[in-house]
Image (cartoon, rainbow, N blue to C red):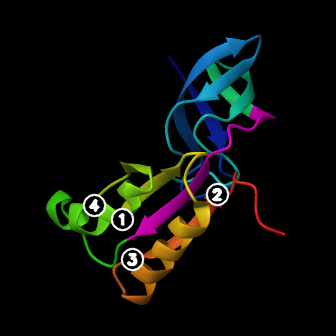
Amino acid sequence: MVKVAIDLKDERYGIETLWAEAVGESRYRLRNVPILAFGYSEQDVVTATNVNGQLCVSGIAERGGHSTYRLFFPAPTDNEKFRLLWGPLEKLGCTFERANTRVIGIDVPPHADVYAVYAILEQGEQAKDWAFEEGHCGHPLRT
């Protein structure tokens, strides 16, 4: 595993580094959930080049079929409280990574019903449990 850096084009954060595995010349499969970068999901294959000792992502080579969402809690949320809210998403096959006690990245795997996931995310937002945003939708959408 190696770290790859995605330029966020944001003065506050600069870059996000993600774990990735080499899958070919200058190609790397993302192995964790992007928390800040838009347009990327776990299992996407990216191209990256070495810039001053850091692998910098230059584009997407292949999509992995996953989608990425982010939860923003109105107050710090401990693991116990989060687990109570997480159950319905976990049942759909989603996984998560914590950025901190207020921000969580969600991976929606290809086999999950992204419409059911989105409905749960909207319900949580309406209940004021969280706000959410879509980082990347890699699922095929209905026409």
Please indicate, yes or no, whether residue 102 appears anywhere in the rendered image.
no
Q: Earlier in the sequence, mark 1 or mark 3?
A: 1
At a point 67% along the width and 35% down the height, the residue shown is 44
Q: Earlier in the sequence, mark 4 or mark 3?
A: 4
Q: Is residue 12 above or below residue 26?
A: below
At a point 50% along the width and 44% down the height, the residue shown is 33
Q: Are marks 4 and 2 in contact (CB under 8 Å)?
A: no
Which of the two marks, 4 or 3, is nearer to us in this view? 3
Q: Secondary structure at mark 2?
A: loop
The residue type indicated by label 4 comes to Thr
- Return the x and y of residue 7 as percentages of the image width and height: 67, 44
Residue 6's label in the rendered image is none
Residue 88's label in the rendered image is 1
Which of the two marks, 3 or 2, is nearer to us in this view? 3
The residue to which callout 2 is attached is 10
- Return the x and y of residue 73 as percentages of the image width and height: 35, 73
Distance from label 1 to label 3 (Cα)? 14 Å
The residue type indicated by label 2 comes to Asp
Distance from label 4 to label 3 (Cα)? 12 Å
